[in-house]
Amino acid sequence: MTDSTFHTLEAALADDHFPEVDLMLRRGRHIGRDDGTAYDYLVDAQSLLESFYRRFGCELVQQSDGYFYLLPSGDRLGRRQLSAGEMLVGQTLALLYLDPATLQHGGVLPREALLQRLSGLLGTDALVRTLSPRKRKYDERIAAETVRTQVGEALRRLSELGFVDVLDEARLRLRPALMRFAEPVRGLSDPNVALERLVARGEVLLGEANGDENGADDDATEGEEPAP
């Protein structure tokens, strides 16, 4: 970037924003416009930081949807794993993010809308078994509470990674980084329908981060999260 504030890598690394932003990226956080000055810093220092992170075997990726993340191109920093349940929740949130009704509400929706969409796509039995794959039997009387608890844990993890903001016990704010979960269906004539079928079949993919693109099964297939 020719108009960057930073003329050298040393200057970019000396900036007060670098330590926090670096830790966020290495922990798998997706940094978007909602993150304010952290995002502005990455836009400003992008060309310098790209070469910096390549030395660690990572690509600093900027998506047109308005967010940055680190994508390991080797194994020097390793890769984190998202569980099948977390992937399922992420893909369902991506479906809700693409829904015009969500846009009308500024990306904010009730947590109950997520639970209803999950149940509608998979049914209670398949949903419980995906979220708690090691439970071969479950009590139908507590199935709803099991789903609610597991979805809450998935949301906490996805929030840490910058996919969603948990505003309170009842509301979520969906972030553009959720479009990573829609990568497998981008470019299709009807990506919403294609993603919905993907979720309903239990095929958990995270775009370019998932190297082998295996579908999920009852033994908790995991998707790779691009972070050390």
Image (cartoon, grey):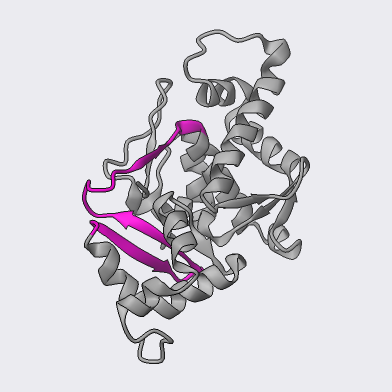
- First to last magenta residue range: 56-85
Residue 162, given in percent of the width and then of the height, sits at 54, 53
Q: Nearer the viewer, residue 119 or 153?
A: 153
Question: Does residue 12 appear to the left or right of 30 in the view shown?
Answer: left
Residue at point 38%, 76% (across, down) = 12
Q: Nearer the viewer, residue 5 or 143?
A: 5
Q: Is residue 121 above or below residue 173?
A: above
Question: Does residue 168 appear to the left or right of 140 in the view shown?
Answer: right
**Residue 113 in view in this figure:** yes
Residue 92, given in percent of the width and then of the height, sits at 57, 44
**Residue 190 in view in this figure:** no
Quarter occupied by the N terminus: bottom left
Q: Is residue 193 above or below residue 130?
A: below
Residue 159, given in percent of the width and then of the height, sits at 58, 47
Q: Is residue 69 magenta?
A: yes
Residue at point 40%, 73% (across, down) = 14
Q: Is residue 64 above or below residue 161?
A: below
Q: How many marks?
A: 0
Q: Nearer the viewer, residue 68 or 137?
A: 68
Task: Residue at the far bottom: name it.
Answer: 3
Q: Nearer the viewer, residue 216 or 7?
A: 7
Q: Quadrant of residue 138?
A: top right
Residue 161, given in percent of the width and then of the height, sits at 51, 49
Residue at point 67%, 41% (across, down) = 114
